[in-house]
Amino acid sequence: MEWQAPAIVLSARPHGEGGAIVALLTEAHGRHAGLAKGGASRAQAAVWQAGNLVEARWVARLADQLGSLSGELAHPAAALAMEDPLALALLASACAVAEGALPEREPHPRAFHGLLSLILRLPAGAPALLADYIRWEAGLLAELGYGLDLSRCAATGTAEDLAWVSPRTGRAVSAAAGEPWRDRLLPLPAFLLGPDRPGANDPPPGPAEWLAGLRLTGHFLARDAFAHRHRPLPLPRALLQDRVAALALAARSAVAPAERAV
């Protein structure tokens, strides 16, 4: 058995004498692991950094074996993000979520291409990509069969003024219908409603909207994608949310003195 394909490195864990168990994401083979001989060595460790794009080759005698991996570095995303803590946190979170949520050896081409797009655009900086990252998580939920229904209000049927999501059903709720239960609902950031909604030309989302989006997708990832595998959300995902929460707090603190002055 053998295949060769472009792949995203999701993780690499030392194994034996200088080897590494590497988890990859490919378009046709899904999340796929293999043993990279010498993968933890000084010569190869840089190739197998999470987030890197590689041209991978997998070989095994039988289809259900772990198999051997080799690869050539195509795009050093991890090194390029090293100087930007938020970009590095986004990259680590995306790889950890993909590795933990996607079933092994099951193709999910939309998840692959969405993650590939994020990685290739990462040099533009994390602030330009956080909304797209959250949309990628929402799309991942949909691919796994846990999609959110944000098309119309679950209580009234209206598609206008959607502001909340039920943490139980994953369905949208309008601002008016949800007001009595606002403390029990999850805020719905407008950027998740799509480009054709009314008011789609609003200013770009900022830290408060990013945080609301991460809390929303994080709730359903934790409850559905990870709890069913008896796992918590990955630590890198929690660290990304903590970084964005700190940005949102700093933004609120900067606004407060200006409001008092007025």
Image (cartoon, rainbow, N blue to C red):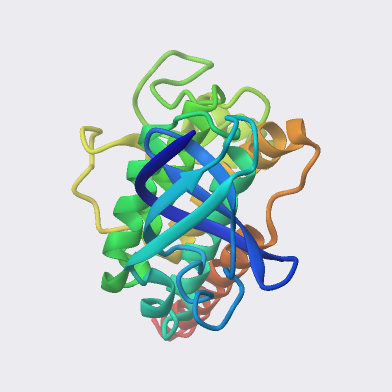
Relative to 140, say whether 246 is above or below: below
User: How far across and how far down the image is residue 126, in percent?
Assistant: 38, 68
Q: Is residue 260 left or right of residue 7?
A: right
Q: Residue most toward the front?
A: 61
197 lies above or below 4: above
Using the rendered view, name the quadrant where residue 45 is placed.
bottom right
Front-lying residue, 246 or 156? 246
- Front residue of 14/8: it is 14
On the picture, is 127 further left or further right than 176? left
Count of marks overlaid on the render? 0
Q: Is residue 3 visible?
A: yes
Q: Residue furthest right?
A: 230
Q: What residue is shown at x 70% (from left), y 39% (from top)?
A: 226
Query: Residue placed at 47% from the left, 58% from the top?
Result: 70
Residue at the far top in the pictured view? 157
Q: Residue, x 54% and y 46% (percent of image)?
A: 98
Q: Is residue 51 above or below residue 100?
A: below
Q: Position of residue 140 (x, y in %)?
A: 48, 36
Left or right relative to 35: residue 95: left
The reply to whether residue 173 is visible in this rendering is no
Which percent across, then down, holds residue 91? 47, 64
As drawn, 199 above or below 36? above
User: In what quadrant of the picture does the C terminus appear?
Assistant: bottom left
In front here: 213 or 67?
A: 67
Q: Which of 60/192 is in front?
A: 60
